[in-house]
Image (cartoon, rainbow, N blue to C red):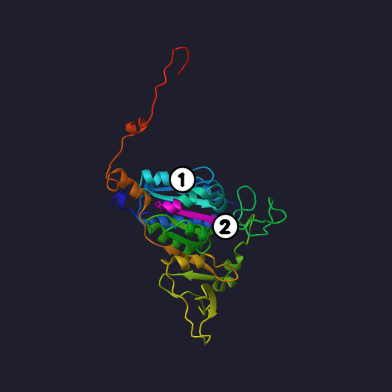
């Protein structure tokens, strides 16, 4: 057996760097999930690139034994776009947080999504700025008291899933840091998607926003406060799957199965944009949707760029940099020798 055919394991993706997150941080669980996933993809380590911005989540590249790029605040999607466009053969992942991606990085995020660049974006959403010590973030709820909003936040929070859908994302999903099996399943589907895959991951910050998702993650609450979306299957939830969701007056309504009404739960269709948007706005006290909300195929940006350069799309073929630089009015700057031109 040659070195090339030896199967990779999770250990192969663990770097020699000390993991420096607060004890109990949800980032550990996400790191474990990603390190468990990558060996199963059959991709050499040197073909992976993990790009991050600024924040607690953005230390991710240090802890994976792959190529990585720790960029500047909010710019990870832009850097990843350039990398994937110039090297389509690489498997490019973006790791970002709710502050990094949705505040200064919002513009870069939406344009990556609308272009359908073949990168995988993992947005860790803990609804707080953790690295800078607990200020409110773009996803913090109204009334959130923090060091920067001592009287309570007045900002209406971003809904990351709705934002991604509005930008035209072709793959939109959600999972939770501690739901390991489900998280790996969602990431596996994201990895297989051609185009931009956007995955929001609820992540607990036990220092500055502990129990932010306890209403749905604590074991007594899980069955009644989470609904798992699977394409082609009924949308049901509860300890004994005794509850369902149905459409009523263009809204999602929970009802008890067998209540005598004759109603049937809706069957999930991840290709339906209307259902995806309704589910993205499904908020407590209703069950929180987890899984893939939207998955469709659309031309991939980097393939179109390469095709255009090679003349497969634009019949003009490859251009000339020299000709471009001399297009239009040009001039020559001359020096009399007394000073640099």
- Tell me the quadrant of the picture where the C terminus can be found: top left
Which residue is most to the right? 151
**Quadrant of residue 336 within the rendered picture:** top left
Dot 2 falls on a residue whose secondary structure is loop
Point out which mark residue 158 bears. Answer: 2
Residue 78 disc label: 1
Percent of width and height locating residue 55: 56, 48
At 54% from the left edge and 44% from the top edge, which residue is drawn? 73
Choose between 292 and 304: the one closer to the eye: 304
Tell me the element at label 1: helix
Which segment did they paint magenta?
Answer: 112-126
Viewer-nearest residue: 147 or 106: 106
Image position, residue 11 (x, y; %): 43, 53
Query: In percent of the image, x 44 and y 53: which residue is there?
Result: 114
Q: Does 233 sit above or below residue 6?
A: below
Residue 9 seen in render: no
Residue farthest toward the front in the current orientation of the protein: 329
Q: Position of residue 294 (x, y in %)?
A: 44, 63
Question: What whole-number distance in Å separates the C-alpha atoms at marks 2 and 1?
Answer: 21 Å
Of the image marks 2 and 1, the number of the one nearer the N terminus: 1
Left or right: where 155 falls relative to 265: right
Check disc 1: other Cα within 10 Å, few if <14, some if 14-19, many if 20+.
Answer: some
């Amino acid at each position: 057996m040659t070195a090339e055919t030896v199967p990779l394991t999770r250990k192969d993706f663990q770097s020699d760097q000390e993991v420096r997150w607060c004890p109990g941080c949800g980032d550990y669980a996400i790191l474990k999930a990603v390190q468990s996933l990558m060996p199963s993809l059959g991709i050499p380590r040197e073909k992976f690139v993990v790009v991050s911005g600024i924040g607690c989540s953005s230390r991710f590249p240090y802890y994976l034994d792959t190529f990585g790029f720790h960029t500047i605040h909010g710019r990870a999607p832009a850097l990843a776009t350039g990398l994937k466009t110039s090297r389509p053969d690489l498997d490019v992942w973006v790791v970002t947080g709710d502050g990094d991606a949705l505040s200064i990085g919002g513009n870069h995020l939406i344009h990556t999504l609308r272009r359908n660049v073949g990168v995988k974006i993992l947005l860790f959403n803990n609804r707080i700025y953790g690295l800078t010590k607990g200020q409110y973030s773009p996803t913090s709820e109204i009334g959130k008291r923090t060091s920067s909003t001592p009287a309570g936040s007045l900002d209406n929070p971003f809904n990351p899933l709705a934002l991604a859908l509005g930008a035209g994302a072709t793959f939109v999903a959600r999972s939770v840091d501690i739901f390991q099996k489900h998280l790996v399943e969602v990431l596996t589907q994201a990895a297989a998607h051609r185009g931009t895959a956007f995955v929001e991951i609820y992540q607990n910050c036990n220092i500055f926003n502990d129990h932010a998702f306890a209403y749905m993650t604590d074991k007594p609450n899980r069955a009644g406060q989470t609904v798992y979306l699977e394409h082609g299957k009924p949308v049901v939830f509860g300890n004994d799957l005794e509850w369902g969701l149905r459409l009523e007056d263009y809204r999602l309504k929970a009802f008890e199965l067998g209540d005598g009404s004759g109603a049937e739960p809706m069957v999930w269709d991840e290709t339906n944009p209307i259902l995806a948007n309704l589910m993205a706005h499904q908020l407590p006290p209703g069950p929180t949707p987890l899984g893939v909300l939207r998955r469709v195929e659309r031309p991939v940006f980097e393939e179109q760029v390469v095709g255009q350069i090679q003349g497969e799309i634009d019949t003009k073929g490859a251009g000339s940099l020299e000709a471009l630089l001399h297009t239009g009015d040009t001039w020559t700057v001359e020096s009399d020798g007394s000073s640099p031109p």
